[in-house]
Amino acid sequence: MKIKTLVASLIIACGAFTATAQEIAFGAQREGWMRKAEECKPQLKETIVKPKAIVRSVADEAAFQGWRMEQAEPIEALYSSSLKERNTVILDLGDHYTGYFTMKLNHTGMPADAPIRLRLTFGEVPAELNTPFDPYPGGLSRAWLQDEVVQVMRLPEEVKVQRRLACRYVKIEVLATSYFDFRIEDVTFRAITSAHGEAPALAEGTDPMIQKINEIGLKTLAECMQTVYEDGPKRDQRLWIGDLYLEALANAVSYKNHELTKRCLYLLAGMADEEGFLHATVYELPTPMPQINQHTMDYSLLYGVALLEYFKETGDRTTAEELWPVVKYQIDYARTYLKDNIYDVEKQPQYWLVFDWKDDLNRHTPIQGLMTFAIDKSYELATLLGREKEVADWPKLLKDMRKASREAFYDKKRGVMVSGPDSQVSYLSQVWMILSGTLSAKEGARALEYVLSDNSTCYPGSPYAYHYVIEAMMQCGMQERARELLLDYWGGMIKKGADTFWEVYDPNDDKKSPYQFFPINSYCHAWSCTPVYFIYKYPETFQR
Ligand code: RAM
């Protein structure tokens, strides 16, 4: 099957539809879907940013990851002094930006008699500029780290970094030079985003920390809104279903750039595998292409929820109608994993269940809950489209799954859902059983209180997981708890200096990394922007 997938995906990606393409799921529609995706491709808005100051790194145990930046000199000092003499300088753009870096270099009198060798390092957070990258211990490609060695052959010269960058700080180091002196004449950062329009103002009297969280959430979202909803502008710079779902929720209440959501929904559908199973992630360049064989069961199920929310928000029935068969297929396929109405985590092929950056999380109960939730929401979509007859057995399936979940996972005595052979108690098991309607609001509140007060529970490791915790709290009538958690967790990042919200944040471990090296983490990450969604959606809780 997988070789066939590759062939089908290449055919789809190249837009070359042949007899083979007709045999694949949605074969006749895909070309049109890809065209629609292309038509919705947004214009990127450019802003020219100039560095605001020269800063210096200060080692400080109390600072996030052990480093902070301190103002050193006004930016004018950079242009009027010798770079050769400085040897190393760090520039501060004043905020996080995504885009392209250029600087002009010139000699100060004596012409250049040899090339100059420079290292440029771009950092989203201070520690990125102060942690040696080599020997590289990380699990993802070293090439994601934003350092470049450039040779400047003649002066004057304009040094341009080809790759798109995401950073606030730029470190320039002189590695090799000769007799002549030289300086930087100009630095420009061409920042880009496709986010346009203004998010609504918050109610007067909104808590200042919530205002700040909203501002940083909006900034995070805008930085990730490029020609798709990217997961992170530093890394992986691509569309993932889980990130899209949360970004689209936040966008729908703020910028309302719905065309971008539509584009992403079509792109994913147009690049499903030949049987119709969605790839968890797709790239745009050089031409749209799925990450072959990268499937995650939780993300493909969430696709239908994202389409439902898009439809409710926009009323765009054509898109919802066209993509409905894709939603249905995800559920039909996931159903082949049910044994006695319980998701069989042993069944082959086993798919990655994302849920969180938390290795010790047992995902059995969470996937059972998420699948129930997705069927429920997809049934709502079917109903809105008047297609519930096609899925007439779903209501019974939902009932059976909830019943089976309670029998298999509910520890009635303690009032918590457990998961796996060791009966693990985690936040996410409670959360997904609440969102799926398996636990009532009252039972859910009890379960959440239990995990909140028990130190041995498996707690979330990422803003992605915390998003669902807050949603579950709201559903159980725990508004005050949800507000406290939002202030505490996202506010915690702000107190540690965040300009944009991070991919991973564990208040107990600043250097936590799913990739064995914290500088490769993304510090402007789509799935972390969702306080924006909560703050606008529930003003009575968050706008006071
Ligand atoms: C990483 C990114 C992304 C996430 C996937 C599962 O590459 O952090 O946000 O959706 O993993």
Image: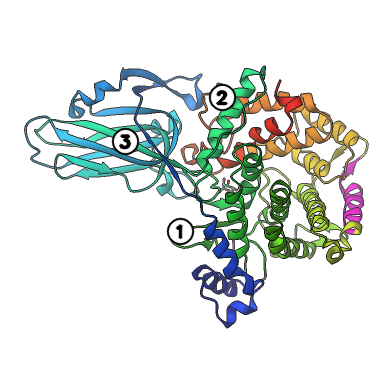
Q: Position of residue 124 (x, y in %)?
A: 45, 34
Please tell me which residue is depicted at 47% across the width and 24% down the height of the picture.
66
In this rendered view, identify the residue nearer to me: 403 or 512: 403
Please tell me which residue is depicted at 35% across the width and 37% down the height of the picture.
189
Is 306 on the left or on the right of 167, as rendered?
right
Q: Which mark is residue 285?
A: 1
- Up-down relation of residue 520 to residue 3 (above or below): above
Residue 74's image quarter? top left
In this rendered view, identify the residue nearer to me: 223 or 456: 223
Instruction: Give the residue type at disc 3.
Output: Thr
Is 6 on the left or on the right of 172, as rendered?
right
Ranked by sequence position, the earlier of labels 2 and 3 is 3
Q: Is residue 435 magenta?
A: no
Magenta residues, as a range?
Answer: 397-411
Q: Which mark is residue 494?
A: 2
- Up-down relation of residue 436 to residue 518 (above or below): below
Q: Residues within 10 Å of mark 1 (few under 14, many from 20)?
A: few
Residue on which disc 3 sits: 188
Where, quadrant-wise, is the N terminus in this rendering?
bottom right
Label 1: state its secondary structure.
loop
